[in-house]
Image (spheres, rainbow, N blue to C red):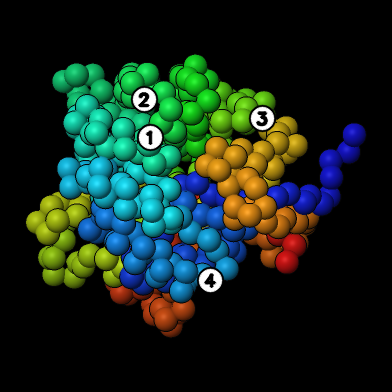
Amino acid sequence: MSAPDELTIPSPADFHVHLRQGAMSELVTPHVGEGGISLAYVMPNLVPPLTTAADAESYISQLHKLSPSTHFLATLYLSPSLTPEEIRKAAAAGIVRGVKSYPRGVTTNSDGGIEDYETYYPIFEEMERCNLVLNLHGELPSDIDRGICVMNAEHEFLAHLHKIHNRFPNLRIVLEHATTAKAVEAVKACGDTVGCTITPHHLQLVVDDWAGKPLNFCKPVAKLPSDRQALRDVIRSGHPRFFLGSDSAPHPLANKYPSAVTHGAPGVRPAASGDDLEPTGVIACGCAAGVYTSPILVPLCATLLESFGALDQLANYVSLNGRKFYGYDQPDQLAKGTIKLRRTQAPSNVVPPVYVHPKCQAMGDGDTDKVQVVPFWAGKKLAWEIVN
């Protein structure tokens, strides 16, 4: 049977996206809808992080002003300041659907992350009662003395997933951005209340694609070819608890290609957007973790799934499975409408080399105030495009 030239699928949802603050947010928030997403689940690791229902409502209101046609849902940042009472407030507000857990120091703006999950059992109990989702960044911090590094940090974390699930079997949990075969098997082994997001870039990248290549560096890092195959296989199978969470994470170029100098030194400045800052005085020689896919997201997913024989699972991956897990699969639950894609050979379907804030178009490439971000697959051609 020949491959189709057009596809119509239910409105896609991205259940893990970073939309930042300030000028960077102004640039990237409209890209969510342009990439084909109608429902976006937004991460809370801002500066400062979103830790209250009031903070979340204010932030979501800002996002809606930037992209009125996209529906945004908020998460709260799991931290010592979060209380069961605040969980109840957040659930009542309606726009907060989950709480995000970051182990301390593993990724962007995670310095306030957690170190001991049992401390938060009262929070998890209230989340279970309020039907909020626990979103787990599934890594342990690197600790070379204990044998933990970026390549096995996800595997070492999985015991925590099982422990929390066994203690709170009715708590909905999402293991975010899985990268390994062992993570896939761990989620499969859990009950129906445990889901898993898989990013499109992890369906493409392996370790050789990010080693020494900052634009492809993200956390958790892409792993071995056998791990990538496991991710592809579970998407191709249509397993109902695996779905799209892009982890699209824009970073200023200065943070992807940092100099070994201190923020605040002559000629060096923090990102204009106010995101992804390291404290003044910290040597900024590490590459920021994040891959940016929002503007091309659904065509990218179609292109990648077709490349490994899973195009027939596109609707499950980008629309149906995630909406069902989060409870947005009914017509009155933000699930209205469809999106159409068509196969294209148009030269215009090449991914742009960079996205620049409209107010910065006239600035030179070396201007440190220029707000710009390089997307995943820059310069490559997508096989599919959205029909407007």
**Which badge, 2 or 4, is on the more N-terminal residue?**
4
Decide: is 239 above or below 300: above
Marks 2,1: beta carbons within 8 A: yes
- Write down the residue under mark 3: 238
Residue 77: x %, y % from top left? 29, 47
Q: Can you tell which of label 3 and label 1 is closer to the viewer?
A: 1
**Mark closest to the chain's N terminus, 3 or 2:** 2
**In front: label 3 or label 4:** 4
- Secondary structure category for the residue under label 3: loop
Q: Is residue 93 visible?
A: yes
Closer to viewer: mark 3 or mark 2 = 2
SS under mark 1: helix
Alpha carbon distance from label 2 to label 4? 37 Å
Return the x and y of residue 142 as percentages of the image width and height: 24, 29
Please identify, in this view, whether the residue under mark 2 or under mark 4 is nearer the observer: 2
Q: Answer whether labels 3 and 1 touch (C-beta < 8 Å).
A: no
Q: CA gap, disc 3 to disc 1?
A: 27 Å
Residue 68 is labelled as 4
Q: Which mark is residue 305?
A: none
* 167 relative position to 142: left or right: right
**Residue in the picture at 90% in, 34% down:** 1
Q: Which mark is residue 168?
A: 2
How far across and how far down the image is residue 27, in percent?
44, 69
Residue at 16% x, 61% y is 263
How far apart are the alpha carbons under marks 3 and 4?
A: 32 Å
Please tell me which of labels 1 and 4 falls first in the chain: 4
Q: CA distance from mark 1 to mark 4?
A: 31 Å
Of residue 117 and residue 290, the one placed in the foreground of this image is 117
Amino acid type for the residue under numbered disc 2: Phe
Q: Which residue is label 1 attached to?
A: 128
